Amino acid sequence: MLALFRKSFMIPYDDLFIYPTISAAKNAVKDYCEKEKLPCTFIGDEAAEIDGKTYDILRGYGLRGTYAIRCRER
C-alpha cells in the first residue's frame, strides 16, 4: 500500500522547537494513549501497537519550522 493512503495521526508534542528524541517521542505517544484510553505496547524504538494496530512513530518537521510526532499505520 502506498504510504500516502495509510492512516496516520499527529501526537501532541509540547517542545515544538526541539527535535524530539526517541524517549520524548515514546513519552508523547504513551501520554496520548493514556489520555485517549487506548492500549499501547512499544515494538522497538520506532514502532508501537496501538489499539491492536501497528504504527511507525515518525519524528520530523511540523508546520512553520517546528517539529512534530506522527504515527503512521504499517
Image (tube, grey):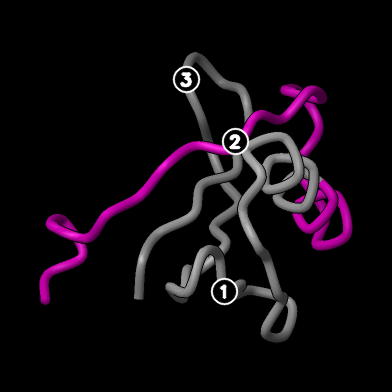
The residue lying at 88 percent from left, 59 percent from top is: 23
Q: Are marks 1 and 3 in contact (CB under 8 Å)?
A: no
Q: Residue 49, which numbered label?
A: 1
Q: Position of residue 6 (x, y in %)?
A: 22, 60
Quote the CA–CA distance across marks 1 and 3. 26 Å
Magenta segment boundaries in residue numbering? 1-27
Between circles 1 and 2, the one closer to the viewer is 1
Q: Residue furthest front?
A: 37
The residue lying at 61 percent from left, 23 percent from top is: 66
Q: Residue furthest top?
A: 64
Q: Residue 24, which numbered label?
A: none
The type of residue carrying mark 3 is Leu
The residue that label 3 is drawn on is 63
For the residue labelled by badge 1, is the local secondary structure a helix, a strand or a loop?
A: strand
Q: Position of residue 11 (x, y in %)?
A: 59, 38
Between circles 1 and 3, the one closer to the viewer is 1
The type of residue carrying mark 1 is Glu
